[in-house]
Amino acid sequence: MARLNRSVVCSRSSLRKDLDEPVVTVHQSIGEAKEQFYYERTVFLRCVANSNPPIRYSWYRGRDVLSQGSDKGVEIYEPFFTQGETKILKLKNLRPKDYANYSCIASVRNVCAIADRKVVFRLTNKTAPASIKLLVEDPIVVNPGQTVSLVCITTGGEPSPTLMWSSSSGSLPEKSLLKDGVLTLPAIASDDAGVYSCIASNNVGNPAKKSTTIIVRALKKGRFWITPDPYHNDDNIQIGREVKISCQVEATPPEELQFSWLKNGRALRSSERMVITQTDPDISPGTTNLDIIDLKFTDFGTYTCVASLRGGGIPEISIDVNISSTTVPPNLTVPRGKSPMAVREGETVELECLVSGKPKPIILWSRADKEAPMPDGGMQTESYDGVLRIVNVSREMSGSYRCQTSQYNGFNVKPREALIELIVLYPPAVEPVWQEVRQGLGRQVAMNCRVLRAHPSRVLRYEWRLGSRLLHAGTFDSRDDTDYTIRNLAREGYGEYTCDIINQAGPGRCTFLVTGKAYPPEFYYDTYNPLWQNRPRVYGYKLQWTQMNPNAVDRIMAYRLGIRQTGQQRWWEQEIPVEGNIQKGELITHNLTELIRPEAYVVRLTPITRFGEGDSTTRIVTYSEMSHYDP
């Protein structure tokens, strides 16, 4: 029985059939670890390998087999939760003879011809887990374009540990270089920032891991906004009242961010009327505010906020804000004729909101009619010119869109907003898209084409055609389908009928193939003693079949029988006449003779009606010594 089971496993190509190299890991009992890792302590050697079929493990000390009970200082067991997956060798209170070479042999008893696998571990009084040291700072702050080298060295471990590096991003940068524990990142970029970890392993104890964080300096997304006097609920700047200019920048690292202010190109210092403040440097994005108390005409001018990093190495960001009598809050309108916007599915459309005011703020676009993402995948899309451009419009994008002023690069006042309706036109979706209709001559054929959805859904036109010839046309009223009926099918009525249902976006098409082809016959495979032999070198075969849907088309007048030996190309054909009408389920029989033993044959059967040949079906007839009888 064991042999049978093994052969069954090997024959299943869908199963994985191999044996990985086993791995031995070494651990000391918890709570007993000292600086000298293994000295008169209990030690566990764990052997693990992946395999299909299941593994049998064997332990050796030198050349001696270790088994449960063979040595009082040795215990061998499988953890309950890993039955069959691992085998643990426990050495209790190490003795001098326990310092030796230990072999773990993983075997599947030659199932599927898979050879045994062996691994050797040398246990000595110097065996110890890996320990490492990073010769770098943490964190490491660098400028983009610099080359960064991370040095990791081993400070202990027996056997000698192997070193590897990993990144919090999941993979090391493609351009990184690794040699002797040194990871080099040339021309570092912002995308390379993150946590890098050096991991050392020698299969003794747990792997050692040390990490450092690389921070790449950056300044981005400089923005500003103007806040009129918050104590008077003003939307406009007014002489004699307060106005605040705020400037915001995303900085890495945020604690290095510093701001300075200029007025008309000259440095500006904080005073009783010009109060400069900055948010907590640990908060990102960093923000600085310039409060102008009791605004005067002489305060009009261009104020410049300059953001930089104390570490240098990257360009500053300068933001100019003009304060004058023409500085006014925004207004938002939709140009005439731009809502609603109708566009065909698959085209490109631009939704436009006109923004006035000085300065002009960033415009935020979102869906107004439902909680749904914008075409770019986000819940909001920013626009600097008030235009939302949508490429390859789909019907799911129909609906209301909101354009709204943001506080950025404009006034920090109640948002102005407007709505634009987008109408996506798409041709009718219809059913059936394609349908075969089999019918005999002189009978009625009814075809129906139905609209599932369309926009616009009214007014719809329809056109019925046979080939290119127009048969019938019209428009829908309250219905969502159209019919065409052939009262008395003539031979010239066979062919491909199309129904185009058309709206402003284009047509949707139903196609009907009207044919007089008979359905295929269905071979009967349960014939009792179908094969006979009355001469030494030839045999006969009783071929039986039924006809699928025999009354669907004209009466079947004959079957064309084709037969050829397997492996050959030449067919022998004959017609089998049929008298009267075939009934559904009726078993039809024809004897094949003069078949050469022990050859197999391909048999093809094709029904014939007034229309012509119908669908064929084939089967293979084989000779068997056990399945014939002598008449």
Image: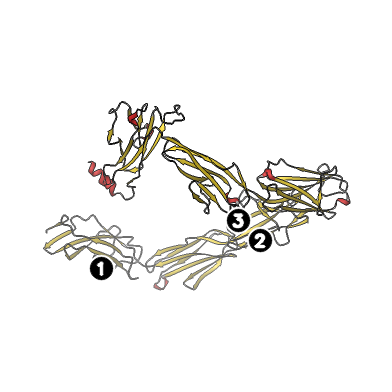
Q: Which residue is mark 2?
A: 350
| Label 3 Cα crowd, 10 Å radius (few <14 / some 14-19 / many 20+) | some
Foreground of the two, 118 or 93: 93
For residue 369, above or below residue 468: above
Kind of residue at badge 3: Met
Kind of residue at badge 1: Gly
Residue 195 placement, left or right of 435: right
Closer to the N terminus: mark 1 or mark 2?
2
Q: Residue at x 19, y 55 (%)?
A: 528
Foreground of the two, 197 or 553: 197
Q: Secondary structure at mark 3?
A: helix
Q: Secondary structure at mark 2?
A: strand
- Quadrant for the C terminus, please: bottom left
Instruction: Check residue 397 in the rendering and tell me which mark sits there, or answer none.
Output: 3
Closer to the N terminus: mark 3 or mark 2?
2
- Quadrant for the N terminus, please: top left
| Label 1 Cα crowd, 10 Å radius (few <14 / some 14-19 / many 20+) | some
- Between circles 1 and 2, the one closer to the viewer is 2
Q: Is residue 456 visible?
A: no
Residue 168 placement, left or right of 405: left
Residue 279 placement, left or right of 154: right
Residue 92 percent across, percent down from the top left: 36, 27
- Between circles 3 and 2, the one closer to the viewer is 2
Kind of residue at badge 2: Glu
Residue 231 percent across, percent down from the top left: 82, 41
Instruction: Check residue 562 in the rendering and tell me which mark sits there, or answer none.
Output: 1
Closer to the N terminus: mark 3 or mark 1?
3
Residue 226 percent across, percent down from the top left: 78, 49
Q: Secondary structure at mark 1?
A: strand
**Spatial distance from mark 1 to mark 2, Cα to Cα?**
64 Å
Q: How is the image coloured?
A: secondary structure
